[in-house]
Image: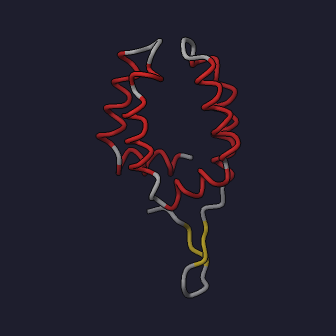
Amino acid sequence: MQVAMDITAKCCHKEMESYGQCVASHPSTWQQHCQDLKMKVAQCTSSHPVIQKIQTDCSKEFTEFEHCLRENQNSPTSCSVHVAHFLGCAETVDLTVKNQDGLFIEVLS
């Protein structure tokens, strides 16, 4: 998961910064106020192969985490178990792919 975070920070720094500031500025209504910024982060990261692999392999855990956030907008920290499940899943994702020569390579950049 650290790889995905590094990619997001490297490629989508501006979007992450704006989203983080919005969430901090609207602690009880961030889901409504920051939705457009959340979508910008998602659009920025969604084209990277590592992010795509994590999204595919851990979609159930991420969906459960998002559901928890929607249900607990005033106390997002109550979703820490869901975050842990998602991060645990992301850590187990196999980041190797077969390239056009048939060789397995790790997708990190």
Note whether 3 is above or below 32 in the view shown. Answer: below
Note whether 92 is above or below 69 in the view shown. Answer: below
Question: Residue farthest to the bottom?
Answer: 101
Q: In which quarter of the view is residue 64 placed?
A: top right
Q: In which quarter of the view is residue 39 placed?
A: top left
Note whether 102 is above or below 88 in the view shown. Answer: below
- The residue positioned 66% from the left and 60% from the top of the image is 94
**Colouring used for the render:** secondary structure
- The residue positioned 59% from the left and 50% from the top of the image is 55
The location of residue 89, given as percent across then percent down, is 69, 45
- The residue positioned 61% from the left and 17% from the top of the image is 72
The location of residue 65, given as percent across then percent down, is 64, 32
Q: In which quarter of the view is residue 38 placed?
A: top left
- The residue positioned 47% from the left and 53% from the top of the image is 46
**Can you say which quadrant of the picture contains the C terminus?**
bottom left
Residue 103 or 52: which is nearer the viewer? 52
Residue 31 or 18: which is nearer the viewer? 31
Give the total of numbered labels.
Answer: 0
